């Protein structure tokens, strides 16, 4: 990642950013209900445009036009930013300028007809069932935090929910009797997700023996608590999974979204239909879910080539 260049505190553009950005952040948090992590990324991407514009003749966020945006795109490419990073930055800026149009601060969105770099389709990675088992076995359930961590890993894998959704769960979000979880996803969309018996048992044990002691005499409706009795953070979940993966001897980096990928892939491998997986994941578009079919097809091909006698023979012949 290229180093960030400093922006002078006296910059008029930075002062303007200080006026516009809080309004945009409030919109992202209150209306779109985006996670704190996503909001921070949006802020960083807007600040990146500020860096580019600072020092230019009459710099102004509200006077940016399509031509200047093309120059910014070329600037990013010259600085060797990855295509995926550039696409994310442009997506954030599109949202920012759509907001400014809505608020009648600008007349048109300078990115309305500007295309993002074409991205190669990257298949999501996932864990095998045995790797998931190794990850779970790495949890030390003799501690209060271990009881919580076991429930977190089981729930992420069993339900496929996002880490932001997991961290925002409250006590009344979960019904252990029906093994259902009410989740507020992206765009403030509510959905019901399911969990199997192992996840329900791990959660029940945490609620009975772990959470009350973590909570102490404090009051908190959050389902998952940190060691101080506060709501567990997304960062804590991420570092916990990374630590468990290292302890389990897993070679790939394990993060919450990897368990979401694993959930979807294993469901499709088990015969679930695409529409059901889409609903459980909370995808608005079916195309977002369809990428997992490519993963399962790739996995099926590997299994076929390894298991079918004629396929093995043909593969051996091609090596000769």
Image (tube, grey):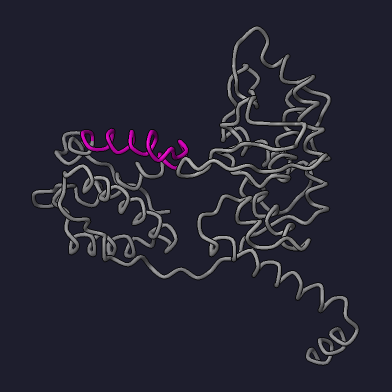
Q: Position of residue 316 (x, y in %)?
A: 84, 87
Residue 249: say if magenta. no
Residues 122 and 95: in front is 95
Q: Which residue is drawn at 34% across and 64% down?
A: 77
Quadrant housing residue 78: bottom left
Q: In the picture shown, does residue 300 fall above or below 5?
A: below
Q: In the picture shown, does residue 7 fall above or below 1?
A: above
Residue 33: say if magenta. yes
Q: Which residue is drawn at 53% across and 69% down?
A: 121
Give the main secondary structure of the magenta stretch: helix
Q: In the picture shown, does residue 16 fall above or below 226?
A: below
Quadrant housing residue 118: bottom left
Direction from residue 137 to residue 9 in the image, left or right: left
Q: Where is residue 109 in the image (x, y as percent from the top left)?
A: 22, 56
Q: Which residue is drawn at 72% across and 46% down?
A: 157
Direction from residue 249 to residue 185 in the image, left or right: left
Q: Position of residue 268 (x, y in %)?
A: 72, 62
Q: Give the range drawn in magenta.
A: 18-39
Q: In the picture shown, does residue 210 fall above or below 252?
A: above
Q: Which residue is drawn at 72% across and 15% down?
A: 212
Q: Which residue lies furthest to the front in this view?
A: 178
Q: Residue furthest right?
A: 309
**Quadrant containing the C terminus in the rendered view:** bottom right
Q: Position of residue 308 (x, y in %)?
A: 88, 80
Q: How many labels does the image show?
A: 0
Q: Residue furthest left?
A: 58
Residues 172 and 35: in front is 172
């Amino acid at each position: 990642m290229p180093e960030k260049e400093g922006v002078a505190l006296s910059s008029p553009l930075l002062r303007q950013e200080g006026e516009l950005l809080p309004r945009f952040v409030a919109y992202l948090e209150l209306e779109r209900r985006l996670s704190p992590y996503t909001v921070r990324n949006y802020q960083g991407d807007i600040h990146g445009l500020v860096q580019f514009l600072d020092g230019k003749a009459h710099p102004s966020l509200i006077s940016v036009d399509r031509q200047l945006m093309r120059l910014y795109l070329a600037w990013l490419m010259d600085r060797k930013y990855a295509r995926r990073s550039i696409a994310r930055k442009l997506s954030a800026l599109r949202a920012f300028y759509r907001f400014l149009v809505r608020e009648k601060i600008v007349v048109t969105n300078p990115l309305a007809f500007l295309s993002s770099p074409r991205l190669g389709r990257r298949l999501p990675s996932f864990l095998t069932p045995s790797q998931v088992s190794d990850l779970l076995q790495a949890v030390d359930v003799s501690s209060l935090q271990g009881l919580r961590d076991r429930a977190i890993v089981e729930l992420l894998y069993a339900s496929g929910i996002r880490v932001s959704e997991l961290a925002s769960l409250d006590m009344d979000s979960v019904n252990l009797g029906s093994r259902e979880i009410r989740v507020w996803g992206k765009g403030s969309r509510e959905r019901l997700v399911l969990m199997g018996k192992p996840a329900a048992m791990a959660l029940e044990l945490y609620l009975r023996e772990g959470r009350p002691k973590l909570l102490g005499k404090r009051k908190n409706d959050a389902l998952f608590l940190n060691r101080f009795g506060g709501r567990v953070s997304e960062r804590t979940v991420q570092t916990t999974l990374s630590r468990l993966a290292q302890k389990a001897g897993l070679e790939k980096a394990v993060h919450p979204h990897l368990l979401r990928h694993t959930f979807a892939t294993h469901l499709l491998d088990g015969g679930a239909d695409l529409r059901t997986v889409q609903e459980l994941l909370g995808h608005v578009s079916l195309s977002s879910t369809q990428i997992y079919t490519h993963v399962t097809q790739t996995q099926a091909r590997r299994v076929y080539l390894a298991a079918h006698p004629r396929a093995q023979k043909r593969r051996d012949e091609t090596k000769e």
